Every structure is written in structure tokens, then in C-alpha cells.
Image (spheres, helix red, strand yellow):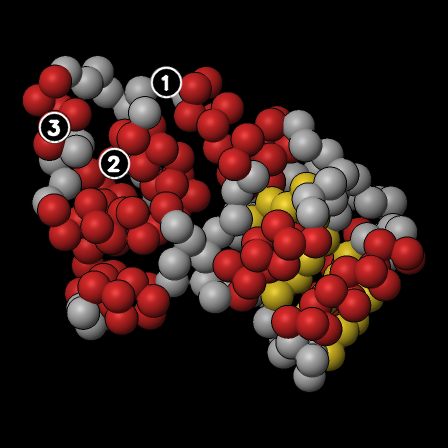
Amino acid sequence: MKILIGDDHLLFREGLRRLLEQLHSDAVFVEAGTFGEVVEQCRTGGSFDVVLMDLHMPAWPGFDGLREVQSLQPGVPVVVISASESLADIRGALDHGATGYIPKSSSVKVMMGALNLVFSGGIYVPPGALSAATEAAPRRRSLDVADRSSGYGLTQRQREVLECLRAGKSNKQIAYELGLSEGTVKIHVTAIFKSLGVKNRTQAVIAAAAMAS
């Protein structure tokens, strides 16, 4: 596994690298101290398996920087690890394609769990931010008693798949747990997105929390 760590604090990069070594002892690490260095590594350093980066590094251009990193590393998970716990920063990162947001204040246990989740194909969203987003977000449509009981019109199987998405499980994990093929899981996920009026897993997770409230 090849991992890019972008953070302007050397001490934090070293600590994160040591933590990651516990999860993947054979991992190869590349470090960057500025956003410009992150971009340069993404452009010339070959393909990475995951990019972990802070917000507001020197030369940080704003959230569009996440799009730039993704364009240079197509399909590679980009996870924000930041000291900021602002809901605006969390939502901004997720809305611009980040596959996870881990606050630096997280305990070692939480951070390891979050990284494991991301490495297995899931999306990590801080629980507090998820609750706040659920309370603040307007309903996709007005719900009456029938809407709630029908679970937004999802079938029982689709609700099971949605619960797995909420737990951050990958399509492969969902297929194994529910006894389905990955192709069938993908069909269910597409149907869930359409029913909930969302475009990605992060939005589906937020919608699932709204359903449970």
C-alpha cells in the first residue's frame, strides 16, 4: 500500500505514519508539507492507494484543492485529517469529494477505526457532525406517517443495504453479509440513491440518519 500524507506539521506526519504502520506494516509513505507538494506528488509520484491531507496547509486554495487532487489521482480515496471541527469545513470537504473527515482531536482508537473503515471502502464522518448535519438539513420532501413506515419507499432489502452503507461497509462486505453478488449490491445502491434523491454514499448516510430520527 502506498500512502500520501499531506500536513505542514512534521510531528503530526510522523505520528500518523507510525499509527498507519500498525495497520499496514508493509506500507510505503510519501510526505508533503504544503499543498503544492501534495499536488506535485500526485502529479509525479505515481499512483497512491490513499491520500490523507490537512486543510489550510500553506498554499491551500480552498476546497477546490480536493477536486484537483482527485483529478490527478482518479478513483483514489482522499481523506481529510484536520484540526478543524467546523461543520462548514466537514461538509465542504465531503461535498467536494472527500471520502472521509477525521478530526485530529480523535483518540487513537477512533482514528484507527476511522482509517480501517476508509481502507475497507467505507466513508468516515464524525458522529457529532453527522448529527448536526441531520438536524440542520431540510427534508428532501415532507414526510407523513405512511412515508416513515415505508422507509422512503425502499424495499426491505434496500433498507438492509442502506444500513450497511450507514455502517461504512464496502459493496464487497455488503455482498458477503447479505448473501448477494456485488453486482446485485450495486443495483440496490443505485436504486437507494434514486429513491433518496442523493448522489453519493455520504449523502445517503446523512439521509439514513434522517430516516432513523
19 sits left or right of 212 in the view: right
The label shown at residue 149 is: 3
The image shows residue 33 at horizontal and vertical percentages of 87, 56
Q: Are marks 3 and 2 in contact (CB under 8 Å)?
A: no
The label shown at residue 138 is: 1
* Name of the residue lying farthest toward the right: 10
Q: Nearer the viewer, residue 109 or 153?
A: 109
Please name the residue shown 34% across and 41% down the image: 204
Q: Amino acid at mark 2?
A: Leu
The image shows residue 176 at horizontal and vertical percentages of 27, 71
Q: Earlier in the sequence, mark 1 or mark 2?
A: 1
Q: Earlier in the sequence, mark 3 or mark 2?
A: 3
Distance between mark 1 and mark 2 Cα atoms: 13 Å
Seen in the picture, residue 69 relative to 94 is either above or below; the reply is below
Question: Could you tell me how many numbered marks the image carries?
Answer: 3
Q: Which residue is mark 2?
A: 196
Q: Amino acid at mark 3?
A: Ser
144 sits left or right of 63 in the view: left
Residue 82 visible, this orientation: no
Q: Secondary structure at mark 2?
A: helix
Distance between mark 3 and mark 2 Cα atoms: 15 Å
